């Protein structure tokens, strides 16, 4: 009898990542390809099915070996109904019952999950959080994507929007955010936010990224040093608040900002020690994500294993 496999899918606004993953969380085969989401759900679902069949052929596995499929997408989502309500980077996708449509196309069980949650679950299962039962992940990229795992389970909340920590307000009446609030963490501590703030401070339009800002901050540039330092400060404030809410053993940083490595961890830790609560010794360990771009597909597959493994 053959060993079942799970499929992990990470659907973004421009890229589709797909992997065949075994019970231990090892990727057997994977593919990353551009996807045209403007074509709408039908085109994208057909592409997903085509890619899964190609990967199975490459691994010499039949479709009947699929134990379950985990699909990570941007949201907000209705997880119980398996519906993408809408997503900023999936223009025109409104109330798409993607779980059932993909299940009908593949004739196997499909689970839908928020992409940031799937990445967090990947790091929890096989990456920086694998030694514990609790972990909070902050992906510091275009925005700040988050996932919270408590007692081995992803937190969803009644409205499926738990752990939108990138929109935690860290500066009252601060910078406006596309979400409608002001002073959200992601305006100050996402890779794009940091780059945007340096460009605004310099009055320049030259496009830069957070690695460039980190590099100049390290070498003593005043503007980059200030804005990088503020990113670390607000991340430390966020970590204190996160710790009061969830009390996890570890907070993991991924995304573009995490490329700075210890420069980021040391900067946040410096502020964290000054900001922290002193009533108990429960400081979380700050860590860097370990799985890179594979976190989403590994996590989505892991969630499918949890839901459908027999
Ligand atoms: Zn916001």
Image: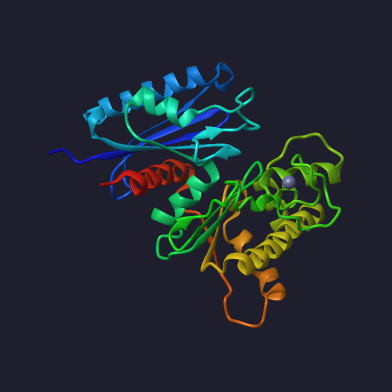
How many labels, in total? 0
Look at 61% across and 39% down and name the residue there. 76
Image coordinates for residue 288, horizontal then vertical, percent: 53, 57
Judged from this view, the residue extending furthest toward the left is 1
Q: Is residue 141 visible?
A: yes
Residue closer to the observer: 208 or 232: 232
Judged from this view, the residue extending furthest toward the bottom is 279
Image coordinates for residue 229, horizontal then vertical, percent: 74, 60
Q: As drawn, is 20 to the left or to the right of 277? A: left
Q: Quadrant of residue 64?
A: top left
Q: Identify the image's colour scheme: rainbow, by chain, secondary structure or one colour.
A: rainbow
Q: As drawn, is 69 to the left or to the right of 243? A: left
Residue closer to the observer: 101 or 256: 101
Q: As drawn, is 50 to the left or to the right of 35? A: left
Residue closer to the observer: 248 or 100: 100
Quadrant location, the N terminus: top left
Look at 65% across and 83% down and name the residue there. 279
Image coordinates for residue 128, horizontal then vertical, percent: 46, 58
**173 versus 107 height, above or below:** below
Q: As drawn, is 91 to the left or to the right of 47? A: right
Residue closer to the observer: 154 or 136: 154
Look at 19% across and 41% down and name the residue there. 3
Image coordinates for residue 173, horizontal then vertical, percent: 86, 53
Q: Is residue 215 visible?
A: no
Q: Quadrant of residue 22?
A: top left
**127 versus 44 height, above or below:** below
């Amino acid at each position: 009898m053959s060993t079942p496999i799970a499929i992990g899918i990470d659907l973004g606004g421009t890229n589709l990542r797909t992997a065949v993953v075994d019970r231990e969380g090892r990727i057997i085969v994977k593919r990353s390809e551009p996807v045209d989401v403007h074509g709408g759900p039908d085109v994208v679902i057909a592409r997903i099915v085509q890619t899964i069949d190609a990967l199975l052929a490459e691994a010499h596995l039949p479709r009947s070996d699929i134990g379950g499929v985990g699909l990570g997408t941007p949201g907000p989502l209705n997880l119980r109904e398996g519906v993408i309500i809408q997503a900023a980077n999936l223009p025109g996708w409104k109330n798409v019952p993607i779980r059932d449509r993909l299940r009908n196309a593949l004739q196997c069980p499909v689970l839908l999950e928020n992409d940031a949650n799937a990445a967090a679950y990947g790091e929890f299962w096989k990456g920086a959080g694998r030694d514990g039962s609790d972990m909070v992940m902050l992906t510091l990229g275009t925005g700040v994507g988050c996932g919270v795992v408590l007692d081995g389970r992803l937190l969803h909340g009644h409205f499926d929007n738990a752990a939108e920590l990138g929109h935690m307000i860290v500066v009252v009446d601060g910078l406006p955010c596309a979400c409608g609030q002001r002073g959200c963490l992601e305006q100050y501590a996402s890779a794009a936010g940091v780059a945007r703030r340096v460009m605004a401070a310099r009055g320049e339009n030259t496009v830069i990224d957070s690695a460039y800002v980190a590099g100049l901050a390290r070498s003593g540039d005043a503007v980059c040093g200030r804005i990088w330092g503020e990113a670390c400060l607000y991340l430390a404030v966020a970590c204190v608040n996160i710790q009061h809410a969830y009390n996890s053993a570890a907070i993991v940083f991924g995304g573009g900002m995490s490329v700075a490595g210890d420069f980021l961890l040391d900067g946040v830790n410096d502020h964290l020690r000054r900001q922290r609560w002193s009533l108990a010794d429960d400081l979380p360990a700050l860590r860097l994500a370990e799985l890179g771009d594979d976190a989403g597909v590994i996590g989505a597959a892991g969630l499918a294993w949890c839901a459908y493994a027999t």
